[in-house]
Image (cartoon, helix red, strand yellow):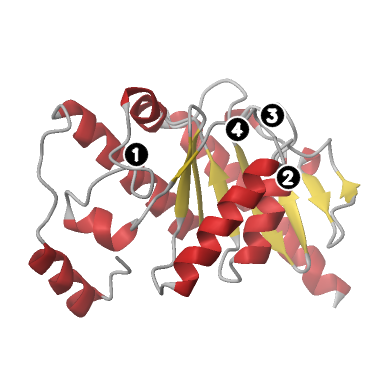
Amino acid sequence: MTGLLDTAVDEARDEIVRVGTSLFDRGYVHASAGNISARVGDGHLITPTDAALGFLERDRLALVDARGEQRAGDRASKTLTLHRRIYAADPTARFIIHTHSTHLVALTLAGVWSQDDVLPPITPYFVMKVGHVPLIPYHRPGDPRVADLVTARIAGHLASHTPIRAVLLDRLGPVVWGPNAAAALAVLEELEETARLWLLTDRRPEPLTTDAIDELRSTFGAAW
């Protein structure tokens, strides 16, 4: 069993480094903003505090056990509590990405569509790949109260059978998650692109009609 866990940790280390490099190279992150984690067994791997995601070193990633105690690597990101609480609240979450993506942070500064949906459903792929994204009021980076607000949103949407894959932290950017790195990346990319489109069009496009969204639900199982 230990060998299997060691293999999983090694694979997760490589995946986090790969994702961090990709995000940096494509302009989704800058400087030391943002963090990435993966669920491994009962514990988690997470990027170190103040790490530059484009220049991660696999052996310096923080390994944290089920109790939240660090077992290896540099000091864990100050958002560790938030990551651990998301994993606990959503059993399907196995990979989490937090960035300060330009257009999504700009959206919080310019004004979101609503507190429950930061963007209107203006494209079918936003409805299918992202879904509802609530705004989390501003708190300082690493404030543990943010975890309470995020997990309350996750629980509320699970209860209404519209599970969420992301939240937007006011002035700080998105936190997205999924069953693997590829799924989490897809949510982040579609979310940032929709924010860019919304801002480029001066926030004028009408949302998709109710009938159009119902068709996406029935055809593709969109959770909207």
Marks 1 and 2, the one that precedes in the sequence: 2
Q: Given contact means CB atoms under 8 Å apart, are the residues at marks 4 and 3 in contact?
A: yes
Measure the alpha-carbon separation of dots 1 and 3: 22 Å
Percent from the top left, x then y, of residue 218?
19, 79
Residue ID for mark 1: 192
Measure the alpha-carbon separation of dots 4 and 3: 6 Å
Residue ID for mark 3: 51
Q: Is residue 10 above or below residue 213?
A: above
Measure the alpha-carbon separation of dots 1 and 4: 18 Å
The quarter in which the N terminus is drawn is bottom right
Q: Which secondary structure lies at badge 2?
A: helix
Measure the alpha-carbon separation of dots 4 and 2: 16 Å
Q: Residue at 49% of width from left, 65% of height from top?
A: 156
Q: Given contact means CB atoms under 8 Å apart, are the residues at marks 4 and 2 in contact?
A: no
On residue 80, which mark appears?
2
Q: Which secondary structure lies at badge 3?
A: loop
- Amino acid tagged 4: Leu
Q: Viewed as shown, does residue 2 lie left or right of 211?
A: right
Front label number (3 vs 2): 2
Residue ID for mark 4: 53
Measure the alpha-carbon separation of dots 1 and 2: 23 Å
Q: Given contact means CB atoms under 8 Å apart, are the residues at marks 1 and 2 in contact?
A: no
- Amino acid tagged 2: Leu
Marks 1 and 3, the one that precedes in the sequence: 3
Q: Residue at 26% of width from left, 32% of height from top?
A: 196
Q: Which secondary structure lies at badge 4?
A: helix
Marks 4 and 2, the one that precedes in the sequence: 4
- Amino acid tagged 3: Ala
